[in-house]
Image (spheres, helix red, strand yellow):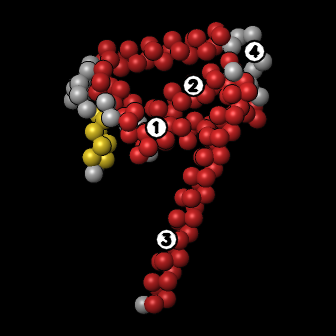
């Protein structure tokens, strides 16, 4: 961490924020029925899709802009201190996934109908990403085979 323009206290503040939100969700939903195991896969897919949307997609550049430089060679956190730490969070889809999962589970537990709708939309989006990636891979494989036949 000494090579980054932030301090451990900034990471600790983010961790404390996450832990506080997690505690609030757990406390606020303690009287609700627990999530069914069948909801875990759609929630995971929805969390993946939301983390990817926020962390990588052009349409969400406005969210990242105060914290991240969008460069041709990739995204980099900018600034220092807490700004840099948030930038690191926004450039790490695995890290961001923990936050999106917390938000989606909190929404699902505290506003069940809205949570189910949002989860369904985002899980469907994740399925679309998977299918688009598979289609791109098949097209690339087809081009490789076509080039081999022509040689």
Residue in front for this viewpoint, 94 or 62: 62
Q: Earlier in the sequence, mark 2 or mark 3?
A: 2
Image mark for residue 90: none
Instruction: Quarter of the image for the C terminus: give it.
Output: bottom left
Q: Earlier in the sequence, mark 4 or mark 2?
A: 4
Image marks 4 and 3: residues in contact by CB distance under 8 Å: no
- Which residue carries the number 1 mark? 54
Q: Is residue 148 left or right of residue 101?
A: left
Q: What percent of the width, then of the height, locates residue 45?
A: 62, 41
Q: Earlier in the sequence, mark 3 or mark 1?
A: 1
Above or below residue 49? Residue 35 is: above
Instruction: Quarter of the image for the N terminus: give it.
Output: top left
Q: Is residue 72 left or right of residue 54?
A: left
Instruction: Give the Cα separation between the discs numbered 3 and 1.
Output: 27 Å
Q: Earlier in the sequence, mark 1 or mark 2?
A: 1
State the residue at coordinates (43%, 18%). 15
State the residue at coordinates (65%, 46%). 124
User: Within the image, what quadrant is residue 23 found in?
Assistant: top right
Q: Is residue 41 visible?
A: no
- Which residue carries the number 2 mark? 103
Residue neighbourhood size for the residue with mark 1, other residues' Cα within 10 Å, grouped as few (<14), some (14–19), many (≥20): many
- Which residue carries the number 3 mark? 140
Instruction: Give the Cα separation between the discs numbered 1 and 2.
Output: 13 Å
Above or below residue 115? Residue 30 is: above
């Amino acid at each position: 961490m000494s090579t980054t323009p932030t301090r451990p206290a900034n990471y600790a503040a983010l961790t404390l924020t996450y832990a506080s939100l997690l505690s609030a969700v757990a406390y606020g939903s303690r009287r609700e029925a627990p999530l069914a195991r069948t909801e875990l896969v759609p929630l995971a897919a929805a969390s993946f899709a939301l983390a990817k949307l926020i962390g990588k997609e052009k349409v969400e550049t406005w969210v990242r802009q105060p914290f991240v430089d969008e460069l041709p060679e990739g995204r980099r956190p900018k600034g220092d201190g807490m700004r840099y730490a948030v930038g690191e969070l926004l450039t790490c889809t695995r890290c961001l996934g923990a936050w999106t999962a917390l938000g989606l589970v909190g929404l699902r537990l505290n506003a069940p109908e809205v949570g189910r709708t949002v989860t369904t939309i985002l899980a469907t989006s994740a399925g679309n990403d998977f299918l688009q990636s598979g289609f791109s891979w098949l097209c690339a494989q087809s081009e490789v085979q076509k080039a081999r036949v022509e040689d």
